[in-house]
Image (tube, coloured by chain):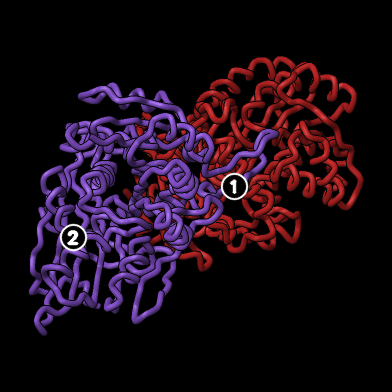
Chain colours: A red, B purple
Amino acid sequence: MAKVMIIGAGGVGGVVAHKCAQLPEVFTEIVLASRTESKCKAIAEQLSRPVTTAQVDADNVAETVALLQREKPDLVINVALPYQDLAIMDACLEAGVDYLDTANYEPPEEAKFEYKWQWAYQDKFANAGRMALLGSGFDPGVTNVYTAYLKKHYLDEIHYLDIIDCNAGDHGQPFATNFNPEINIREVTANGRFWQDGDWRETGPLEENRSFDFPAGIGPKQIYLMYHEELESITKHLPEIKRARFWMTFSDNYLKHLEVLGNIGMTSIEPVQFEGKEVVPLQFLKALLPDPASLGPLTKGKTCIGCIARGVKDGVEKTFYIYNICDHEECYAEVKSQAISYTTGVPAMIGAKMMLEKKWAASGVWNMEQLDPDPFMEDLNKYGLPWQVVEIDQPTGMED
Amino acid sequence: MAKVMIIGAGGVGGVVAHKCAQLPEVFTEIVLASRTESKCKAIAEQLSRPVTTAQVDADNVAETVALLQREKPDLVINVALPYQDLAIMDACLEAGVDYLDTANYEPPEEAKFEYKWQWAYQDKFANAGRMALLGSGFDPGVTNVYTAYLKKHYLDEIHYLDIIDCNAGDHGQPFATNFNPEINIREVTANGRFWQDGDWRETGPLEENRSFDFPAGIGPKQIYLMYHEELESITKHLPEIKRARFWMTFSDNYLKHLEVLGNIGMTSIEPVQFEGKEVVPLQFLKALLPDPASLGPLTKGKTCIGCIARGVKDGVEKTFYIYNICDHEECYAEVKSQAISYTTGVPAMIGAKMMLEKKWAASGVWNMEQLDPDPFMEDLNKYGLPWQVVEIDQPTGMED
């Protein structure tokens, strides 16, 4: 008998609501809240059982606290914007509610992904006897659990870790971003960064890249080194790691569009004067591009996200590749969202399930790799994100 | 003793004003008029002798007539927008003033370059005893005169004509248009069209292209077949021409930017709803791009515009290439504009000089190739646009 409140009614919020609604034995009651309640109601209409909807401005702590005190959920699943993490954590502390999110806090005025702001809540959550689970999406989230699982069962020590995120889907549009274009573009235009020999190394934006041959018929794709937030927590919690990198696929077409839009100033967040008012170019770009939600029914193909870990087992060097394959069209058929939202929303549901079932229960602020991977891995197979581990005995191109 | 009124104070208007001011024995008095008089004053300050400035809305015939009646020029040099040609012709007829422009009338609501609207003024100008000289820029303008000159001195008949416009300059910006971006983009995204065997043939936008090796150290560049207005008048006045084409160079980088801007809808003239008001994407793009005038001091390199004509002389097939090389930095040093404006503005001044000196004097509406090319060609050499003719005896790649 547990009650959960989902804050955020974008693509991921929709998936979380669908998946929680499918498990009434765990999620007895569901509240879906967002700045725009009509978006919650639209999701609610797709579900197999009734849920409560509510309007909330998650930037406003007092407003969120009032809603939490009225609804009294056991857990908040925060799938709003990453700018809002701290405000929602504050509200959870004040209302005495557990917390889960899928992406770390990011200050709105700079593209800076760091856990320091949220880790600083460690004592507050511990003292309050409350749990905050950080980054329970796919990457971060499943990739952290994959790493912990390989460490628990396949390798005594992990020395080299490559997390590789491939979207081999095609939405048929000349250009569109798969989620909020603003967040997307901030991420892609940032410098690359990876962990090596106890320190961070920087690259230019998308500077380091190579071809990787993906399984399940996807084949070779160009992958680009980026910074991604799970690198920070994984290298902290697995200090034996010598090198940890994150890679993502981008098509030449996507990169060409981004380059041009950057060149002409369309990705800038600096307002320009236009016909007597201030216009932020990136906001106008957002207005021109297809709504990411509209791409769901159009997207075909697969995603493949996984980890390649090289280390030692019983004194022998071994390499394992663990990954999930997800199909855009199958996701849409099940929850009215494509695989990008699906692969983030399902792990959020499973993380919440771990907490409500007390399989993961501990006061304080936690990253995914700190907790026992086994029950989470079992649920990934049950609830739509099956994985496999293969031992690699041929070069993959990721050795250097 | 002649007085000229220049309407239009953009890049070309500035060049025309500079060049007319350099020839006080021809252009005794100069009036510079524009919708924005401050732009006229800014040009006036650069000149070696005083000129009169005036404010005029050239779309408003009565207003233009009133200004003409007040100033009483002998000739109007129209270097305003091509949308305004007919209104200014009407005003000239009413005020009894000769007329010259550099680009044919184009209805604002469609990208349609045709002489029919201006040719329809033939009787009006003839009956009024007034002269209208159409298209006295470089292309149209000098290219028409080049063709007439080759026909007069080098070939009895011209059978194949290729006009090739190369801008090998570099302004150092990732993307910028050399003149009004709206006009530029309308031109480039239009279908290609060329004359063959008595009829027009269409191609997709920029579909037909090849490499051409330019002289003066410019070397090979990709050239793209476009429609250009001088093809219409030249094939009418030289009916022996079997095929006439117009080509322009574009860099891969320029085309990549145009493609992306088209894909995301930024070149559209259809308004979109944005923050409670209607915004025309192309207008917003114009606001983001560098002001073409700001490129003048930044542009380096050369332009090369010319005609390759193949035909017969005394029964023998011959091919000639006639062209001008113009240097962006030298132009800027002389008249504070780069070569794109310079190559249009100098021929406008020379056309006006031909009319005021009565070397070209005839009632009615005239295209450049209908008039004696010799005095105009002589002035091109004198006033900044020297040309050369070479006989071609090797394949140029333009034979098919």
Disc 1: CA contacts within 10 A as few (<14), some (14-19) or many (>=20): some
Q: Report the residue at 85% width, 39% height from top.
A: A30
Query: Please, which chain is the residue tagged with disc 2 on?
Result: B
* SS label for mark 2: strand
Q: Report the residue at 18% width, 75% height from top.
A: B310
Query: Please, which chain is the residue tagged with disc 1 on?
Result: A
Q: Quadrant location of residue B362?
A: bottom left
Badge 1 is on which residue?
A: A289
**Which mark, residue B159?**
none
Q: Position of residue A314 (x, y in %)?
A: 43, 48
- Camera-nearest residue between A293 and B25: B25
**Residue sticking out furthest to the bottom:** B315
The residue type indicated by label 2 comes to Pro
Q: Quadrant of the C terminus of chain B?
A: bottom left
Answer above or below: position of B393 versus A221.
below
The residue type indicated by label 1 comes to Leu
Disc 2: CA contacts within 10 A as few (<14), some (14-19) or many (>=20): few
- Camera-nearest residue between B236 and B244: B236
Q: Report the residue at 84% width, 43% height from top.
A: A26
Answer above or below: position of A57 versus A323.
above
- Camera-nearest residue between B203 and A392: B203
Instruction: Answer with left or right where residue A218 lies relative to residue B203.
Output: right
**Which mark, residue B220?**
2
Question: Can residue A375 be seen by looking at this rendering?
Answer: no
